[in-house]
Amino acid sequence: MTFWRGPVGGLGEVELVLPALEVVHLHDRGSRGGVMVTGENIPMSSYSGLWYGARPRLAEGRLSVAGQHAAISRRAWRASRKGRALRVWAVGREYKYRETENRRHHVLERPEAQVAMTRSSWKNPDVIFGAAHGAADSVDISLAVLFEGVYTRNLSLSGALISAPGRLLARAGD
């Protein structure tokens, strides 16, 4: 099933696939969900995490970029949006992905580049719009589009507060 498909300037057609069952191990499909980005001139990126509604969430996430494992971390209890940013280490680069204005606006950034993303709707967008700045390349765009298919609501303060009881209960069960 395609969540979103469209042209990306200079890179051709790009597709955001959700759910992407092919990125989730068969024995994990009941509890984990996957999303992936493919395209004509863009490296494949994929993410799998525990299901939350129809999207994988950040909890216990696994990220792959251009066939390589990538690391992610975040600090859920920081007061600022920048402090709660998702940190990503992929293909020798360090990124931050964070909410900007509200839950429909996000930015993926590294020192040399930035990709700002906007959704027409937070939950089920018809349109996903992106604007690249600086030395943004196909890897940056692949990652920015990928995270549009991940449940990232807890990157906001209200989202972090809403998800806190579930996070505490999950840790108590460990």
Image (cartoon, helix red, strand yellow):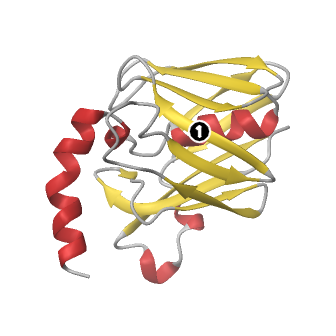
Q: Is residue 147 left or right of residue 39?
A: left
Name which quarter of the figure residue 72 lies in.
bottom right
Compared with 20, 39 (above or below) is above
Q: Is residue 29 above or below residue 4?
A: below
* Residue 48 position within the rendered picture, expressed as x and y whole percent measured from the top left: 51, 61
Give the residue displayed 72% in from the left and 53% down from the top. Answer: 90
Disc 1 target residue:
96
Q: Nearer the viewer, residue 41 or 60?
A: 60
Q: Give the quarter of the figure containing the C terminus.
A: bottom left
Residue 67, position in %: x, y? 77, 62
Check disc 1 and give the amino acid type.
Lys
Q: Describe residue 35's horizontal placement relative to residue 101 as left or right.
A: right
Q: Residue at x 16, y 68 (%)?
A: 169
Q: Position of residue 102 (x, y in %)?
A: 35, 20
How many callouts does the rendering have?
1
Against 65, residue 99 (above or below) is above
Look at 48% across and 42% down and name the residue there: 149
Could you tell whether 167 is left or right of 84 in the image?
A: left
The residue closer to the viewer here, 98 or 148, is: 98
36 vs 169, left or right, is right
Q: Residues within 10 Å of mark 1 (few under 14, many from 20)?
A: many
- Residue placed most toward the observer, 36 or 84: 84
